[in-house]
Structures are given as structure tokens and as C-alpha cells.
Image: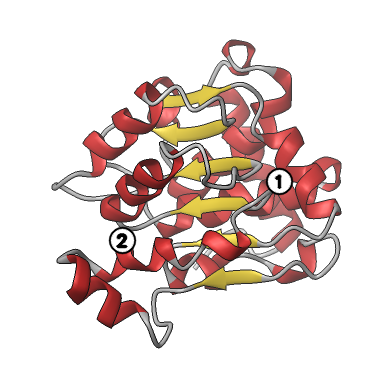
Amino acid sequence: MEYLKDPDAIYKASFAAIAEAIDLDTVPVQLQKIVTRLIHSCGMPEILPNLNWFGDPVTPAQNALQSSAPILVDATMVASGITERFLPVKNRIICTLNAPDTRDLAKKNSTTRSAAAIDLWLPNLDGAVVAIGNAPTALFRLLELLQEPSTPRPAAIFAFPVGFVGAAESKEALINAKLDIPHLTLRGRQGGSAFAAAAINAVALGDRQ
């Protein structure tokens, strides 16, 4: 079978096709690389109109990573999708979903493990980079915590929960929360771990991509 086999040629052809398919002039310059990566992760240029951002989440996230901030993720699939060699200072990737206390905390609070896991982020949340790519309840719980003035603030939030129950609603809640925390999200049911990991990889790569 005849098909493109050279990895560099595939990479260049992919990003050239994206550049032809979308109008990046509608996107702030500092977000153009991350938007391209998100489209590359799903093969769907049509997501562009549904991307929503507040401020510039890329620059504070890059600064946070350079300062050794951790990356907090809601699912092991997000953690697995982050290319660790891209990270500037071997930043920790923290997923508390399977931590020893998560199941008991979920039972105590009558909630999901994904939501309970977010409570365990608190010791590491200040100045961290947040990537949610699975559970709407994780994003809802993060927003609940951030409504409290005493809750530490992350540097940036990249939110891509997916599904038919709560995904669209949780992202609208982030947009409407007015937290004054830079964020990037995708309206609607679409999302997933690949989106969240692609966002972090784009942030970590910076001008190297």
C-alpha cells in the first residue's frame, strides 16, 4: 500500500492541512499553537468556533511550569498523554483519582471519585497547571472549591470534560464563574483526555513546536 511513512513529513503535512482548514486570525497569537494542537489531537477543524478562553492561559501556565509547578490532572489517561520529555523541569504530574483516601471521601460526600479526588489537590493547587479531560464532576467540584476565597488559585485551567451528562454544563459553569483565572475550554459535549494532554504538551513545548 502507498502511504506517507516519514514521521517528519507526516507531521508537516498534518499541520499544513490544519493551517489550510482554519482561519487562525480569529485566535489570539499566544493561543494559536495550542489551538492547532487541539485540532490535531482530534482531526476536527470544526471545533474552532466552540473553543472558549478567558485571558491568556498559555503564558501563566508556561511560567508556572518553568517555576516547577505541578500539573494536576483528573484522570490517568490525561497523565499518560502528557509527554514528559517536553516538560521544562521534570514537573510532577499529579492524579489523585486512585489515591488511598479518594474512595472513602467520595462515599462520605456522596459524590464521584473524580470529584472527591479534587479535594486532594488542595495542598498542590496554588500556582499549579490544571488539566481536566474526563469527568464533569471534577470540574464542577473544582469550581465549588474556587468559590471559597481561602482556596489556593491555580495558574491556569485547561478544561475538556467529555460526555452526555454534565460535560457541557460544567464548561459553561467555568465560563460563567468569573473566577479571574485564565482558562481554555471547549463548549459542548466534546472533550476527552487527548484534548487535555494536547493542551499541556503545547504549553510545555512553547516555541519549540
Image coordinates of residue 7 in percent, x first then y, are 70, 62
Q: Nearer the viewer, mark 2 or mark 1?
A: 2
Looking at this rendering, what residue extends furthest in the top direction? 26
Q: How is the image coloured?
A: secondary structure
Say the numbered circle drawn on residue 115: 2
Q: Residues within 10 Å of mark 1 (few under 14, many from 20)?
A: many
Which sits in the foreground, 81 or 156?
156
Is residue 189 shown to the viewer in this render? no
Which sits in the foreground, 186 or 174?
174
Image vertical order of residue 132 relative to residue 28, above or below: below
Task: Determine the image quadrant of residue 114.
Answer: bottom left
| Residue matched to label 1 | 203
Which amino acid, mark 1? Val
Image vertical order of residue 2 relative to residue 180, above or below: below
Image coordinates of residue 209 in percent, x first then y, are 79, 46
Is residue 148 shown to the viewer in this render? yes
Q: Residues within 10 Å of mark 2 (few under 14, many from 20)?
A: many
Image vertical order of residue 95 relative to residue 144, above or below: below
Which sits in the foreground, 86 or 165?
165
Image coordinates of residue 37 in percent, x first then y, are 60, 43
Residue drawn at x 66%, y 26% is 56
In the picture, measured across the screen, residue 110 lies left or right of residue 183, that is left
